[in-house]
Every structure is written in C-alpha cells, then in structure tokens.
Image: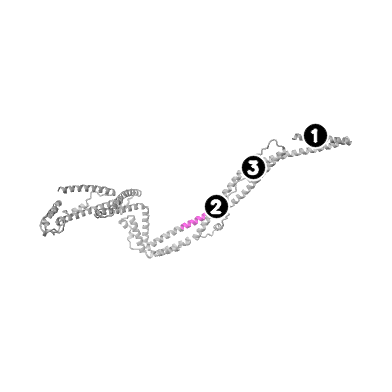
C-alpha cells in the first residue's frame, strides 16, 4: 500500500512540475525567473522534508524516552519489562509505549497512595499501642507482596489493639468492682487517669496494661487477705458459738449484718469476735468444758488409752483461766491435725471395731436356742449376714494389717490402739471373747448337770417324788441307771433316796458343782490351749471344734446304747 502511495505521489509531483514548466513557457517567463520560482518549489520541498525528518527525530527521541521511563517503572514496580511487537511503525510503537507508560504510572501512583494510607494507619496504631513504625523504605515503590505484608502486619496490630482494649476494659471493670467491694480509694494520678478513661482508649501500651494489672493484682491480693481474715474470724466466731452455746437466733442475726462491702463485713465479724472474746473470758469454765468434750471426742477417734489421756494434765485442772483454755485449744488443734493425717488408718480401725461388735452379736445369737423357733426367715437372713461378715472381716483384717505395717515402717514407731499395739489389741479381744465363751459354756454345763442331778434326785416328772417312785419304781431305777456313771454323786443320791424324810436334804458344795471342786471348775474355764488371734484363725478353730464335737457325740451315743 505504501509503495503504491509513493508511486502516486511521485507521479503527482512530476505531473505538477511539468505543468509548472508548461505554464512558465506559455507565459514567457524568463529563464532566470523560472529558476527562482523552481528554487522556491525546491525550498518548499526541502522544508517539508526537513519537517518530516524533524518529526521522525522527535518520534525516535520520544520512543527512547518512553522506553527508558517504562524500564525504570517496571524496575520500581518489580514487574516484567515491556516486550515490543515486531514490525510496528514508529508512530504505533510510540503509541503503545505511551499507553504502557500510562498504565505503569497509574500502578505506581496507586501503590504509593496505598502505601501512604497504610502508613497513616500504622502511625495511628503506633500512637495507641506505642509500637515502632513498620520498616519500609518510604522513597521506593512497594511491591504487591510488600503491600500485602504491610496489610497483614496492620491486621495483626488491629487484633492486638482489640485484645488490649478488651483486656483493658475487663481489668478496669474488675478494678472498679474490687474498689467498691473493698472501699478502696487511690490518690495517685496514674490510677485516676486509668479509671477515668472511656472505652475509646488512646493509650494501650504494654506499660499501661502492666500498671493496670499490677493494680488489679494488688486489689485481688487485698481481697484475698480480707477473705482469709473474714474466714478466720468466722471460724473463730463459730468456735465461740459452739463453746458458749450461743442461741441460733443470735447466730442468724449476724448473717443479716453480713451485707455491703468486704471491709464492712470484716468490721462486723471483728466486732462479733471481740464481743464473743469478752464473753468467753466471762464464761471460761463453760468454754473449757466444751473444749474438753471436743478433746475427749478426738481421744476416742484416735483410740487414746487412759494413760495417754492422763498425760495431758490440764484436762484435770480445775483452776479455769485463759492459759488453761489456750492449752486445751492447742491440744485440740494438735489432735485434729494428727487425726486428719492418719484419718484413713483410724477409720479402718473403727470399721474393724464395728465388724467386731457385729461378730459378737452373731455369736450371742448363735448361743440363743430361741432363735430356732423364730419364724419369718430370720434365721436364714442371719446366716446370710454371717457369711457376708466372714468375707468382709477376713479382708478387712488383712488390709488393716498391711496398712499398719506400712505406717510403722514410715514413722518408725508402733501403731497403738488404747495403749496397745494393734495386733496385740486384736489378740486380747479374741482372748477375752474365748474366755467369755468358755465361761458361758461351763456355766451352761454346770446348769445342765445341776438340772440332771435334781431330776435324778427328785425324778424327771415332778420335783416332789411320789410314794411309788420313792419305793423304787422302774422309772426311777431307769433314770438312776442311765446316769450311774456321774461319779460319787450317783452313790450319794442312791443312799439318800431310801426314805421320804431325807428327800429335802440340802445339796452340799460337791453336789452343786457336779461332783467336782470349785477351783477345778475355774481352772478348766481358763485353760485354753489355743486362742485365735484373728478372724481367719477363729474360723479354722471353730470348724475343727465342730468336727471334734461331732465325733464325740457319735462316741457318746454309741456308748449309751451299749450300756
């Protein structure tokens, strides 16, 4: 297209020059004037050519400048350099470069504007949070990544501000509540400034928050101290109430006064404690007797022996004074601590004693023949309870023995119950039980033998024998024959049954003791060859005794049949 246009222009130029030449000739213009006029045309063409060349030069310079500026902007913006298309004319290239330059300049302007906005936000955060400005070169154009990082940093600061503001408001509310509760006032200007600020806080520095938390901590410590004092006072008042036996109505009256600030409640408690202290001094005897009751209770819980109790001489002092009360209070505190430290062991011993009492109750019931006549399943229920007790008692004794061994190993001393080592105490209980059991057994045998002797003497059907029985009836003879082997008592009864006038004869000491002397009976009562020391040994011995008694009963029955 450009070649055609060039050829047309050249043809038009030749045609125009030929036309001028023809005009000059037709007008008869001299040669010199023709040359002058053609020179004008030539100059005109030269001027046009020069202008076009100047345009091209300026166009090249503009393209070079655009390229330089665009390269600089791409470097500042940290983007890829502009890639020129091939085959473009200078005008098109200049236009494309200009458009691209405008785009890059707009990007730079936007980034710098965003940077300024972010820096203003950063400055605002710095003033509130007392932080350092974000580190960024203010003279350079930030990259998109740098702007994103800046925005993320500011988002973190915004979260920090929100957290600190919430922390500040929460701490401030707590401080105001504590100050009201404690009737606390501060004259320091820093505290006043903190508490007078509204929720739109202009200073959220770490130093200010630290000062706020220090004040909050001081108030919390002060409240805790007041609470401890109030608790101690109330505990002291309760002790006074119990010792002085203060009526319930007076105690309720104090509860009604326990309103308002903590300082007011503390003053009320202190006033009540002082009043009760004065009342205690006036009623020392009554108070000391109440403390002695509490002391006796802990003696029981700790299984103190009589010697251990008598070791505390003030307990028996009748000279009531403040010093005597202090000694009792100190002893109660010591005993309470001792009991609490070893509570588990004491409770186990107490549980053993409860099981022991239950076991003795079962033993008592077992010796009562009337239990076989009871209806309603009581006997079956009793046997079930006995079986359950057997399991728990055996396990409890073993556990308690292990606990005591560990305790004695830990404290390097004996664990005593009522002044005795526990296992000795247990053995003594078993021994006393066996002695009582044997004694009861001997008493039953004695009573039975006495009944047999009376029946042998008077007859089994009536205490006053008839004449027929007195003259030697078959019934009396059979009774005498069946008990012939009783001993000398049998011969004596035969001799005394000859006359009716001798039937009211007094039985002598030998007769009342079944033909044995009294010392021999007592000796038999305390001759126990093997006494059980634990419940497991007791069960084994009982089983062995039952087996032996079964064998003996079979032998006795066979002997009686043979005789």
Q: Nearer the viewer, mark 1 or mark 2?
A: 1
Q: In this orientation, does residue 342 appear?
A: no
**Could you tell me how far apart the alpha carbons at marks 1 and 2 are, in whole angstroms?**
87 Å
Q: Which residue position holds label 2?
A: 164
Q: Which residue position holds label 3?
A: 77
Q: Residues within 10 Å of mark 1 (few under 14, many from 20)?
A: few
Vertical order, 449 against 276 (above or below): above
Vertical order, 138 against 185 (above or below): above
Q: Secondary structure at mark 1?
A: helix
**Could you tell me how far apart the alpha carbons at marks 2 and 3 are, in whole angstroms?**
37 Å
Find residue 463 and report its image quarter.
bottom left
Contact? badges 1 and 2 (CB < 8 Å): no
Q: Using the image as rendered, state which of residue 368 and residue 52 is in the foreground.
A: 368
Tell me: 476 left or right of 280.
Answer: left
Tell me: 111 left or right of 421.
Answer: right
Find residue 512 and report its image quarter.
bottom left
User: Magenta span covers which residues?
Assistant: 212-225
Q: Which residue position holds label 1?
A: 11
Q: Residues within 10 Å of mark 3 (few under 14, many from 20)?
A: some
Q: Residues within 10 Å of mark 2 (few under 14, many from 20)?
A: some
């Amino acid at each position: 297209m450009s070649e055609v246009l060039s050829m047309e222009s050249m043809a038009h130029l030749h045609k125009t020059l030929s036309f001028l030449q023809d005009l000059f000739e037709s007008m008869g213009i001299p040669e010199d004037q023709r040359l002058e006029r053609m020179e004008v045309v030539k100059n005109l063409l030269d001027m046009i050519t020069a202008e076009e060349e100047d345009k091209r030069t300026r166009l090249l310079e503009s393209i070079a400048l655009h390229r330089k500026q665009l390269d600089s902007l791409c470097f500042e913006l940290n983007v890829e350099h502009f890639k020129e298309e091939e085959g473009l004319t200078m005008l098109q290239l200049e236009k494309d470069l200009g458009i691209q330059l405008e785009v890059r300049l707009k990007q730079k302007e936007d980034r710098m504007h965003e940077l300024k906005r972010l820096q203003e936000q950063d400055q605002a955060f710095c003033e509130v949070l007392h932080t350092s400005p974000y580190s960024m070169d203010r003279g350079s154009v930030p990259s998109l990544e740098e702007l994103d990082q800046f925005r993320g940093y500011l988002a973190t600061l915004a979260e920090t501000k929100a957290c600190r503001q919430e922390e500040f408001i929460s701490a401030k509310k707590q401080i105001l509540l504590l100050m009201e509760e404690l009737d606390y006032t501060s004259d320091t200007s820093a505290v006043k400034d903190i508490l007078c600020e509204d929720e739109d806080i202009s200073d959220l520095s770490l130093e200010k928050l630290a000062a706020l938390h220090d004040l909050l901590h001081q108030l919390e410590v002060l409240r805790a101290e007041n609470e401890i004092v109030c608790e101690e006072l109330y505990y002291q008042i309760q002790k006074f109430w119990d010792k002085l036996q203060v009526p319930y109505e007076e105690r309720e009256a104090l509860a009604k006064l326990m309103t308002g600030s903590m300082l007011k409640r503390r003053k009320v408690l202190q006033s009540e404690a002082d009043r009760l202290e004065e009342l205690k001094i006036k009623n020392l005897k009554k108070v000391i007797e109440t403390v002695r009751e509490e002391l006796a209770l802990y003696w029981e819980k700790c299984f103190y022996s009589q010697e251990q109790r008598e070791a505390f001489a003030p307990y028996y002092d009748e000279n009531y004074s403040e010093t005597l009360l202090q000694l009792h209070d100190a002893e109660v505190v010591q005993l309470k601590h001792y009991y609490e430290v070893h509570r588990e062991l004491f409770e186990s011993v107490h549980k053993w004693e409860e099981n022991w009492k239950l076991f003795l109750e079962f033993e008592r019931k077992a010796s009562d023949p009337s239990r076989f006549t009871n209806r309603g399943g009581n006997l079956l229920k009793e046997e079930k309870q006995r079986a359950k007790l057997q399991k728990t008692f055996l396990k409890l004794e073993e556990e308690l023995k292990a606990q005591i061994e560990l305790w004695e190993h830990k404290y390097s001393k004996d664990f005593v119950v009522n002044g005795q080592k526990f296992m000795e105490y247990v053995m003594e209980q078993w021994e006393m039980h066996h002695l009582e059991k044997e004694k009861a057994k001997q008493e039953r045998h004695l009573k039975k033998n006495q009944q047999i002797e009376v029946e042998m003497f008077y007859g089994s059907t009536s205490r006053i024998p008839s004449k027929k029985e007195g003259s030697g009836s078959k019934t009396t003879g059979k009774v005498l024959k069946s008990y012939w082997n009783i001993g000398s008592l049998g011969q004596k009864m035969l001799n005394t049954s000859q006359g009716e006038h001798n039937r009211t004869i007094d039985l002598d000491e030998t007769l009342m003791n079944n033909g044995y002397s009294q010392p021999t009976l007592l000796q038999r009562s305390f001759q126990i060859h093997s006494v059980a020391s634990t419940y497991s040994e007791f069960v084994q011995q009982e089983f062995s005794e039952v087996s032996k008694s079964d064998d003996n009963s079979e032998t006795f029955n066979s002997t009686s049949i043979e005789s």
